[in-house]
Structures are given as structure tokens and as C-alpha cells.
Image (cartoon, rainbow, N blue to C red):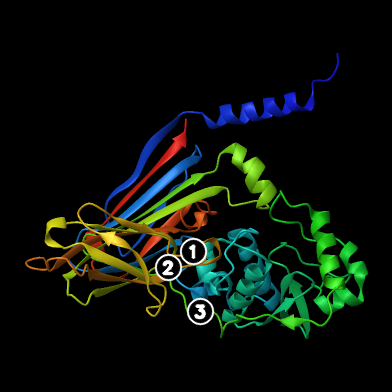
Amino acid sequence: MNALPRFTYTAFFFTLMIISSCKPTRKEILYNQNLIDSVTQFETGGVNPIEKTACVIANTGAGSFSFYITPAEVDMLNSNSIAASLVNSSMTDEQKCLALWKFVCKWRYHSPNAPTYSAWPHTPAALFNSLQCGICDDAAASLGNLGAQAGLNTRVVALKEHVVTEFYYNKAWHMFDADREIYYRDNKGAIAGVEQLKANTAIFDLPQVNSFHSALVYNTINNRNKKAILQSGKLHNAHYLRDKHPTYSSALTLNKGESIRFSVEPVSPIMKKLFVDVLENGGPYYRTAGTLTRHFETNLSPGGITYSESMPYAINRVMVGCERVKSSPPTKVFYSPDSVHWYFKGIVSENSRVTFDPRIMRDHEIVLNYYLKFVPERNSDMEGKTDMNLEIKNDFVFSDKLFFNNNLHSFKVKSLTGNYRAIKIELDCERKQ
């Protein structure tokens, strides 16, 4: 019997994927109460895999509350805390380098579509808390910055259309490629540096370390690295090491009545196979969406009132709406990324809301803070309408590994200031039956 046409097998394959993705799920409430401790760990593991999870953190108290969310296995408050979680004084320099390299390989994804118009992707804590995707220079600079935080002598080296990290120990430089997730040992077992690889190309054919991502083909990686190294001329140290990357903290403050919501769900099997593996080189396999809901109350003046926002996650949409519409006149909304250049975004009133993307350059830009200015319309009647009561929602992106897509399938909420007992956590998930 003749073999079936190839498209028949393809159709059968995708039919199976669609059927498998349609399995029934059940909703499970994991936690729904106020915090009882200043540091609380939440488990999201189980026998059946999680299909979707959502977490809402709300401030039900009268005062403000500052906190941060971190995976249980590493402290993600800032770059220094990440490095301190991964290395210790009992480790050799090479063991420290390997621990940092493995972390960067596992906790970020390579994506040619990642935002590049910023120094934030070179900042480890920003990359691993929110951005999660980057290209070679982001991986190399983040690894180098973690090494600098750990007290290692490090440099970031630009090759032929590629960027890698080198660490200096045992009187030599040693190359660690965190983007292509590989390093090379010579015939003595030492990890080779770029100059050593250029002088001794036989090292490329010795036993290597395989990639973490199954979607990446080892021979292809080896050939690409060999070409990038051998065709490179004078080596150049890249920017954004410890003393140059921006200061970042994942701490967040919620005032009275404010809340933040995180949701994570896997991409469909078809999207995973066709888009994620092929175009994005193996990830991310989860979609994330977050919303921070603020309340802004003030007395409106004819000259306008300025509002500022800052958060540890990349903001991709802002929505402004009236809460008590009768107390405020129609008001113009202006947006600024730097409090210097202002852009008119619309008029908020009882009949309208203002929604916009805060990224001037859209997908190439990362926005962690911005400014709003509220100015009453020139012809509006201010008589008896001086109260400004607005609801401001910030949609943002965060790392899928922050909550359950990590080794321990868990995360922690760590209090910094304020009454943690007034903070309510709602955590639920959906699992396949």
C-alpha cells in the first residue's frame, strides 16, 4: 500500500495536538485569605500539571504596603540578591561561574524579537523578573553583571555578530556563552577562553556541554560559535557591567484599595510547535499578563496635577478612567516618559476613558516608569468640581518563572514595610483532569 501523502500525516499530527489541548480542566483554589506572616511561600505544584494560574494581591488596610515576589529557590529582589543566592564562599571561582551561567541559561529565553532600546535587558534582575527574553548581548551582559556582583573578574566580549562573557581565574580568561548555552573545555579539562579557541581550533571538536534547550541543535551551535570566534578581529568589551547598568529593585508598593494581578497560561501545542520552537528558539512556552490597579485622588487645579508611576515590570498599556464622575470636570490627559516631553492622550470624563501604549517606540522599548498630567478643559466649569478621583490600570509583562514555571513550582511574597496582615492573597489554578 502506498504511503499516505505528507500533508495527511501533518493533518493527523495537528489533530492529535488539538484533541490533547481540549482535555477538561478543573479549577482549584490554592489560597484565599490574608497573609499571616511577613514571608509566605505558596506551592503551585501537584500531580496533574497546571494549565493556568492567577494570583491577586490586594491591600485591604488603611496604610501602604511594600513587598516583592520571588521564586522560592532564588531571591529576585535585585541583582545582588540573585548573585548571593547562587554562589557562596565555599565554591571555587569556576564553580561560581558555572552556577551563574546555568542560572542565566535556564531563566531566560532567546528571542530575536526581544526589546533592545534600553539598558534594562542588561540588568539581571530586570531581565529575570519581567523581560525574560533577550538576545546574545543581553545574556552576556547579565551574566557578566552577576559575576561582578559575586566579586568575579569579568568582561563581556563582542565577537563576529555574537557576544559572550569571559571570567578571569587561575591566571586565564574562560568563555561562557549564556545565549547559545555552551562552553568549551580543552584537552586538560580547563574551560577555554576566546583567544585560546582562536589559537587552537581543535578544542571545538572535543567533548562539549550540551544545550539546555532541546530545540537547539548542538552541531549548529558549535559551528556558529566557531565562525563567530574565528572571524572576529580585535575583541571589544561591551557596556553595562556592574557600574553602568541601571539600579533595579522588584519591590512594589500598594496603597489602600489597590491591587495587582498576575496570570500565567501555556501557549497552545500548535503555537508551541510552529511559533515558539521555530521562531523563538525554544521559549517562552507560557503567556503572562498582569494588571496593577491604582487609585488617584486629589484636588484638581486649573493648572493641572501631575501623577507618576513606577513599577518593576514592563508596562505595555495604561488605562485611565473616572471613579466618581460627577465630582470632576472633563479633563485632558497628557503622558510623558521623562516629565519633560509631554504627549496628549485624550480626555477623561464620565463618558470616556483614556487607553494608550506608553511605549513611544512600541515593541523596541521598555517602560518601567512614566508621568501623567491632568488638566481641566479650558471651557469646563470648575465650580464645585475640584475633586479628582481616578482609577489607573497598568497592564504589564513578567517572567513566567516567577510563579510556578521554576524548579520548585513555588514563589514567595516577602514583606518590606506596612501591615502584611491587611494583604489578601487570592491564588487559584486550573489543572487538566
Q: Which of 234 and 324 is in front in this view?
A: 324
**Relative vertical location of residue 431 with respect to residue 61 in this rendering, above or below:** above
Which residue occupies 68% across, 25% down? 12
Q: Earlier in the sequence, mark 2 or mark 3?
A: 3
Q: Looking at the picture, how far across and down is residue 115, in whole percent?
A: 57, 64
Above or below, 186 against 319 in this view is: below
Assign a secondary structure to mark 3: loop
Label for residue 246?
Answer: 3
Amino acid type at mark 2:
Pro
Give the image location of residue 305, x and y in percent.
23, 74
Name of the residue lying farthest toward the left? 384
Secondary structure under tag 2 reads loop
Q: Find the distance from the CA under tag 2 to the CA under tag 3.
A: 12 Å
Can residue 67 be seen here? yes
How far across and how far down the image is residue 93, in percent?
Answer: 68, 78
Residue assigned mark 1: 129
Q: Which residue is drawn at 68% across and 26% down?
A: 11
Q: First in sequence: mark 2 or mark 1?
A: 1
Residue indicated by mark 2: 312
Q: In this view, does 314 lie to the left or right of 355?
A: right
Q: In this view, does 57 lie to the left or right of 410?
A: left
State the quadrant of the N terminus. top right
Amino acid found under the numbered disc labelled 3: Pro
- Closest to the observer, 138 or 129: 138
Rendered residue at 33%/52% (across/down): 56
Asked if the residues shown at circle 2 and circle 1 are in contact, with their CB atoms under 8 angstroms apart, the answer is yes
